Structures are given as C-alpha cells and as structure tokens.
C-alpha cells in the first residue's frame, strides 16, 4: 500500500507542461476550428435531407396543404415552404465557404474572420427559421379562427377567445423552446469550441 502511495505522489509531482510556439498553437487551433465548421456544414446537409424527406416522414404532410387551401393559405404555405429550402441552401453554401476559407487561412485575421462569419451565420439561420415558423403559425391560427368551422364553433360555444390566444402563445413558446434546444445541443456543440478558439487567437494576437 505504501508503494502505491509513493507512486501516486511521484505522479502528482511530474511536470507535464510543454511550451508550444505561436505557430504550433495557431495550427492546432486551426485544425479544431476546421473540424467544427466542417461538422456545422455536414449538419446543414443532414437538415436539408430531412427537410426534403418531410413528405415521407411526417404523417399527412401532403394532406395538410388541403387544409391550408380551405383557409385560403395554399399559396402562402407553398411560398413559406420554398423559402425554408432557399434559406437552408443559402446557409449551406455560406458554411461551406467558411469551411474552405478557414482550411487555407494563413493569418490569425483570416482565421478569426471565418470563425466570426460562421457563428454569425448559425445565429442568423436560427433566427430566420424561428421567425418563419412563428409567422407561419400565427397566420395559420388567425385564419383558422376566422374560417375553420370547428374553431369558430369552439369560440361561440365557450366564448373563449382569450383562452385560444393564450394557447397560441403557449404553442409559440413550445416552438421557440424546441428550436432553442436544437440550436444549443446540436449546433452549439460546435459553436462553443469556435468561441473558445476565438478567445485563444485574440490572446495570441495580443
């Protein structure tokens, strides 16, 4: 037992510190940043494939457009859906451009620029998607309150317009919560290392 304690003490006293040159640290951080941005790009591809698969994965997805047509929102639903595809394609291209840029970055300035652009793009992607979803949900629910016979009957029967508006608010909060969790646990997993790398690069530059 004494030998084991001696071994632990010797291990604790060892000096594992190693000095790295500025260029070695830059190279290490660049590899980490490239890895994170590459995976953000891959995630956008996966999301695009899932988006394309919605008609197959989501029950009654196609039939839902018949309901939108009954609310006089068929064109609106098509435009909103296409806008989602366009935005995702745009940000996929943006992520890929940042991945290429950081792969060949020769200076701290270029490295920082790629990190900042990627973080900004992911944030914008999140906000745009949430905005589209909220607008779409509000427009559909307002139209349903005016044209859906079941919703109209519910209002007349219970005189519960305030309760319905409250439920709409809860639904929007749930949408925000789900997207926030997706953003935090999926994209955030790769954004956090980028933020740490940014701090390290700024420290090196100083």
Image (tube, rainbow, N blue to C red):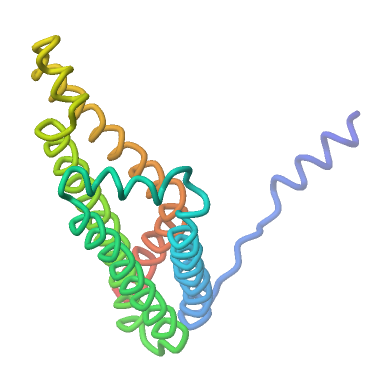
Left-right relation of 31 to 105: right
Left or right, 58 with respect to 67, comes to: right
Q: Residue at x 42, y 81 (%)?
A: 102
Image quadrant containing the N terminus = top right
Q: How many marks?
A: 0
Q: In this view of the protein, which residue sits in the foreground, 171 or 58?
A: 58
Q: Which quadrant does the C terminus fall into?
A: bottom left
Which residue occupies the foreground of this view, 35 or 187? 187
* Frontmost residue, 14 versus 66: 66
Name, please, the residue furthest toward the top. Answer: 158
In percent of the image, x 39 and y 85: which residue is there?
101
Q: Viewed as shown, does residue 119 lie left or right of 161?
A: right
Q: Position of residue 168 (x, y in %)?
A: 19, 29
What is the x, y in percent for residue 153? Answer: 16, 19
Residue at 16%, 40% in the rendered image: 138
Percent across and percent down for residue 129 are: 27, 55
Q: Where is residue 57 shown, x and y percent of the image?
A: 52, 50
Instruction: Give left or right: position of 98 versus 58.
Output: left
The one nearer the camera, 99 or 18, is 99
The residue at 52%/54% (across/down) is 56
């Amino acid at each position: 037992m004494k030998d084991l304690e001696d071994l632990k003490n010797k291990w604790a006293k060892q000096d594992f510190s190693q000095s790295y040159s500025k260029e070695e640290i830059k190279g290490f951080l660049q590899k980490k940043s490239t890895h994170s941005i590459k995976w953000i790009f891959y995630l956008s591809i996966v999301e695009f494939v899932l988006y394309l698969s919605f008609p197959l994965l989501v029950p009654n997805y196609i039939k839902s457009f018949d309901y939108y047509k009954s609310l006089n929102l068929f064109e609106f639903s098509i435009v909103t859906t296409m806008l989602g595809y366009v935005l995702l394609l745009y940000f996929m291209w943006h992520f890929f451009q940042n991945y290429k840029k950081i792969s060949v970055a020769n200076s701290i300035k270029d490295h920082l620029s790629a990190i900042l652009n990627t973080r900004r793009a992911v944030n914008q992607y999140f906000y745009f998607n949430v905005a589209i979803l909220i607008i779409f949900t509000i427009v559909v629910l307002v139209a349903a309150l005016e044209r859906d016979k079941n919703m109209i009957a519910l209002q007349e029967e219970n005189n519960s317009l305030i309760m319905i508006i409250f439920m709409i608010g809860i639904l929007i909060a749930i949408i925000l919560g789900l997207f926030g969790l997706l953003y935090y646990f999926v994209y955030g997993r790769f954004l956090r290392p980028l933020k740490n790398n940014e701090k390290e690069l700024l420290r090196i530059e100083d």
